[in-house]
């Protein structure tokens, strides 16, 4: 930043500087205008990247996903501003990009042409500094609204697919993911293992110390299980104190080893909750599909049967069918 110009920055400029996510790409073939825009945008707190023509701007957009606010000159060599706008709208992926089209053309038909090509706003040269700043603020507000909507949508999706207490997949979402995994495994003729898990004597914790303490214990058990699995394994709450873990690509021996690793990780140390220590163990039933098998109900039934055998065998053990 040119520190000699700091005195021109008002409170709105300082607020803009705090939003580092709003990166501006300037596509302008006139070196003088590029220098003017760079100076002003730096004062207003916007990180910038530059392109000397539309073709270079298009290439940069493929590499700069954070460049969501664009200042685009209409008349440029190779690819002009109108064509650049069309490309952006035709191949829009990910977050929306806000385009401010800048030109010396003032006739209304030119304004209409620019907006129909995909520009969001329009500014004629020579432009006023304050007008440019006001229009950029409009674009920034729209992009901020978009980010808020995306975050809200992601939060709603997370709530719809995850268990509120433990944070892992809920039953419906997990079974959907399990079906997709079985279909994928069938294509590649690979096995899929399922672990049905029950927390031993969990009802005693709820009955003796209350559900809030039980929730803390359950969350810690889930945390230990998640640390003991691979990043692409599927962990979900099946109901109450029962959990289901899907292990893609695991045969019988690998599944049994994984189950034992999870069981030992859970039983490794008591869980501290509300000033008390609670020894925790789990019983695990293991079932493995044959390569290409897509029978969801059969493998779940086998895992469930194996889990109950583990409980009947004294709990804190693994049974594999």
Image (cartoon, helix red, strand yellow):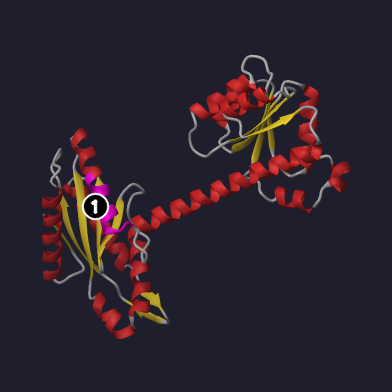
Residue 177 seen anywhere in this rendered image of the structure: yes
Image quarter where the N terminus lies is: top right
Q: Is residue 3 left or right of residue 319?
A: right
Q: Residues within 10 Å of mark 1 (few under 14, many from 20)?
A: some
- 66 lies above or below 172: above
Q: Which residues are magenta?
A: 169-179
Residue 48: percent from left, percent from top: 69, 35
Judging by the rendered image, the residue that carries numbered circle 1 is 175
x, y percent for residue 11: 78, 53
Secondary structure under the numbered disc 1 in the rendered image: helix
- Write the residue at 14% across / 46% down: 289
Q: Residue 108: where, in percent of width, then height?
A: 68, 25
Q: Residue at x 78, y 23 (%)?
A: 31
Q: Quadrant of the C terminus?
A: bottom left
Q: Residue furthest top?
A: 78
Is 196 left, or right, of 92 in this rendering?
Answer: left
Name the outermost residue toward the bottom.
Answer: 208
- The quarter of the displayed image where residue 73 is located: top right
Identify which residue, 65 or 192, lies in the foreground.
65
Asked if residue 170 lies in the magenta stretch, the reply is yes
Q: Report x, y in % for residue 235.
A: 30, 55
Instruction: Characterize the magenta stretch by its predominant secondary structure.
Output: helix
Residue 173 in the image: above or below residue 190: below
Q: Nearer the viewer, residue 83 or 211?
A: 83
Q: Residue furthest front?
A: 108
Residue situated in front as seen by the camera: 247 or 55: 55
In the rendered image, residue 177 lying in the magenta stretch gets the answer: yes
């Amino acid at each position: 930043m040119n520190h000699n110009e700091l005195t021109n920055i008002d409170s709105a400029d300082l607020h803009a500087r705090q939003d580092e996510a709003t990166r501006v790409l300037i596509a302008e073939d006139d070196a003088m205008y590029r220098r003017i825009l760079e100076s002003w945008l730096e004062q207003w707190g916007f990180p910038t990247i530059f392109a000397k023509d539309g073709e270079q701007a298009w290439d940069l957009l493929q590499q700069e996903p954070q460049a969501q606010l664009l200042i685009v000159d209409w008349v440029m060599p190779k690819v002009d501003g109108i064509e650049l706008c069309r490309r952006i709208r035709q191949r829009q992926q990910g977050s929306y990009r806000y385009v401010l089209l800048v030109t010396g053309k003032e006739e209304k038909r030119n304004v209409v042409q620019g907006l129909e090509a995909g520009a969001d706003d329009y500014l004629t040269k020579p432009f006023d500094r304050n007008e440019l700043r006001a229009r950029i603020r409009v674009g920034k507000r729209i992009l901020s609204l978009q980010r808020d909507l995306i975050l809200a949508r992601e939060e709603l999706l997370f709530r719809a697919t995850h268990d509120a207490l433990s944070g892992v997949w809920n039953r419906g979402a997990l079974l959907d993911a399990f079906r997709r995994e079985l279909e994928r495994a069938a294509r590649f003729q690979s096995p899929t293992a399922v672990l049905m898990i029950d927390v031993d004597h969990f009802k005693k914790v709820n009955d003796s110390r209350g559900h809030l303490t039980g929730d803390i214990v359950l969350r810690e058990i889930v945390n230990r299980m998640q640390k003991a699995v691979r990043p692409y394994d599927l962990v979900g709450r099946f109901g109450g104190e029962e959990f289901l873990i899907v292990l893609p690509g695991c045969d019988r021996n690998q599944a049994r080893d994984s189950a034992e690793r999870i069981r030992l990780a859970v039983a490794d140390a008591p869980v501290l909750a509300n000033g008390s220590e609670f020894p925790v163990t789990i019983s695990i039933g293991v079932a493995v599909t044959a390569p290409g098998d897509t029978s969801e109900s059969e493998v779940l039934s086998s895992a469930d049967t194996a889990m109950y055998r583990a409980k009947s065998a004294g709990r804190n053990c693994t049974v594999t069918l």
